[in-house]
Image (tube, rainbow, N blue to C red):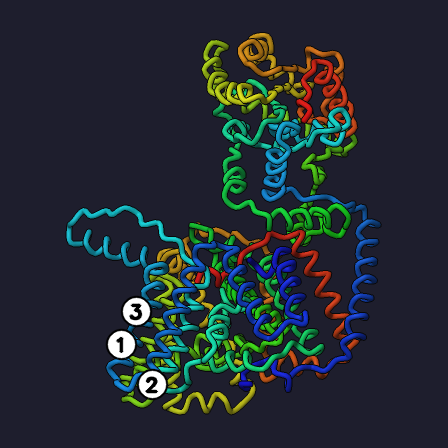
Amino acid sequence: MLFNSISFLVFFSIVLLLHYLPFSWKAKKFNLLIASYLFYAAWNPPFVLLIWISTAVDWFAASRMYRSRSSLERRVYLILSLFTNLGLLGFFKYGNFVLDNFVLIVQRFGFQYEPAAPNIILPVGISFYTFQTLSYTLDVYRGNTKPWRSFLDFALFVTFFPQLVAGPIVRAADFLPQCVKPHVASATQLSWGIVLLLVGLVQKVLIADTIMAPISDAVFNEAGSLEWHNAWAGTFAFSIQIFFDFAGYSTCAIGAALCLGFALPDNFRYPYAAIGFSDFWRRWHISLSSWLRDYVYISLGGNRTGRIRVHVNLMITMLLGGLWHGASWTFVAWGGLHGLYLIVERIADRVGLMAWILQTFSRRLIASFVTYVAVCCTWVLFRALSFDQAYAILKSMFGFQRPDADGVLGITRIMIVLGVTLGVIGYHWLMRDFSLEELAKRTSWWLQSMGIAVLLITLIWASTTGEGRAFIYFQF
Amino acid sequence: MPSSTSNSKQRLPHTPVARFWCFVVLCFVLMLGVIETAARFNGYQPMVQDSKELWAYHRYRATKAGESSIVLLGASRIQNGMVPEVLSRSFPDSEIAMLALAGHDVRAILEDLASDDAFTGTVIWSTTALWLKGDFFWQTLTPNINFYENEWSTRLLLSTRVQVTMQEHLAMLHEGLSFEALEARLSGKPYRNMTFSRASRYRELHRTNADDIERIKARANAIYKDTLEATPFPSPEEMVQHYERIEVAVRTLVDKGCRVVVVRMPSSGQVWELEQQHMPKELYWDRFAELTRAETYHFKDHPSLSEFECSDNTHLDYPDAVRFTDAFAQLVVANSITPKPE
């Protein structure tokens, strides 16, 4: 079920209504749990089973792990959780990928091996809920948290529908305490929750789907060589599309949860105003980058190892981050390129370059622009369907296009992309150290009301005259 | 609450909630009124945008209505020339579903209806020998059928109905005011929209008085000339195998109690002359009419259907489409080809 659909509007209205009826707190949580399963089952009912398996195994493993006195036993339960969760993820998400690569390797050695296509369907949101439930077991294993007593609360934590299929990836320590005390959203929370839902929907439907998607599709669906300005415009368009698609989903998720009285963590903080790549990852998909930092990077030794080893740790973390996004080598390369950027930045930091950059506004601005452009180069790998296509587009971007290069975008489209991109970067700069809530606090209520009315009209216009698209991150 | 949580109580803006939302509603209504008035003042009227969801909705209606459904199949000639709202005046107890789609061949949908046990209604199908030949440039309706079979759901039914209702009432949602159309205008490309869809998927044409009607006619003539002269047309004897291929679906439909009515929609001027030159009615249509188990109506065989002039030589304009549909419906009723009562 998509946030940008009438069925979600109906579904959410019913859930809200039930949530605000004078039932017991337990009944309300049960209502949310059932609603979450229905939300997921609306896409493909049998795959709810996978969520049940993850929930049951992690609940069992964590409680046994906590009670166990032997470190070996604790490790066995951790392995059980890792094996189950990563096993399911591996089979459903990486099964085809592994098989394809295996066949390639075997064929390289001269064997003609062609297995039947396994035809595995990727369960929507599996990467998100797997990481979410794994974080609970890992926290219990590390002694950072105790197992939660209520199975209902835990099942709701794993399945909570606003963030189930595309994040933010919530930690047990953030969510479970909210299940203890009976509460519904206050009038202010409900009001702000609806505002966030609207803002998120406009981000997705208007900017990502209506304005940017057709332009980036035109460029990335072009098989031949592109003129350099077309290649850049398509890449900028995709950078804006993916930001508003994903940040739009996160904003909707935070808004929907808030309407129910639950707080979810931020997932984006104006990433296109980042100065440097470590700053970018503190602002982009925050819940994933902090997950990778806490459970992969630190587990590998983090910063407490030698220089070379820190760089290796960074690279491994980013490669895994790339692979998390999709079962394709282009995603791995995307992660690898980000890893390389982080290593270069680390070296620059060590020689004092980063401190020098941060000294003046103009240097910060230039560094931010360089960061954005470098991030855009990685988006080519993220969006391209193959290395050949990514290579062709990157070559065109840097002026190495063929003489017969195509111009698939007219001047109007290029100007639209430039205008929107500059607008978004400018907005990110202005809001760099702000939040939407702080902006709302500084704006008079009637001006906000007018803004919301404009958003509503825009949403109706864009959703009925444009083409509806699923969220990009659903595929991950 | 963790500090990273954006919506913790400490950070929420405190607005006067009731006043805030009342003012939102007031602003919304006022802005909507202004935009809608401006759109209508500039000549835009509410219209429905055709889509695969809308097609699937009508396909769903076709099955749901059982014996009382009447489906219209074919390409642009019937989508422009047969008005469901007019047809329903002669068949008041029937659900009329327009499944025709401009530029699309009917074979796939005819076979789909034949294999659908739940469909027991009437099929009104527009065709010519050119289409029956089977290797013409028509696109297949298979993607639409697959969409209906695999993706159609109650959720889509709901969203399609809401979307169509909004488009039916708001001129600001006109296709000519979509982002795509606005972008085309910014590029200096002319945005021409001569077709107005309805919720029934009927596409209204108003071309007779168009400034460039002669250019449109010339273009239609050229397309037909190129198409008909591209390859030698099969002989009447060779065409029998093509009739046979599609007759399998017709037979299945008739055997399960459906009524199949085939209509040859009007064409005029040079297009009709070209059609007669390459696929004379007497050698092709009449032969097909003899072989098929379907009821057949050629516009030239009935005085009430033959008086129409197509604005671009191939399609009927709306006023003519109304009269043509009425005349056709009377013929069908007179021949007792009405759906069985429930």
- Chain to which the residue tagged by mark 1 belongs: A
Q: Residue at x 40, y 88 (%)?
A: A349
* In the rendered image, the vertical position of residue B325 relative to residue A364, given as above or below: above
Q: Nearer the viewer, residue B67 or A421?
A: B67
User: Residue B9: where, in percent of width, then height?
Assistant: 64, 84
Of the numbered discs 1 and 2, the one sitting upstream in the chain is 1
Q: Residue at x 55, y 57 (%)?
A: A1
Label 2 to label 3: alpha-carbon separation: 24 Å
Q: Which residue does the numbered mark 1 point to in the structure image? A: A76
Q: Kindly indicate whether the residues beneath marks 1 and 2 are on one polypeptide chain.
A: yes
Q: Kindly indicate whether the residues beneath marks 1 and 3 are on one polypeptide chain.
A: yes
Q: Residue at x 51, y 26 (%)?
A: B136
* In the rendered image, the vertical position of residue B224 relative to residue B152, given as above or below: above
Q: What kind of residue is marked 3?
A: Phe
Q: What kind of residue is marked 1?
A: Val
Q: Which residue does the numbered mark 2 point to in the structure image? A: A302
> Mark 2 against mark 3, which lies toward the viewer?
3
User: Residue A28: where, in percent of width, then height?
Assistant: 60, 71
Mark identifier at residue A83? 3
Count neighbours of disc 1 (C-alpha within 10 A) and say few if under 14, some if 14 to 19, many if 20 or more.
Answer: some
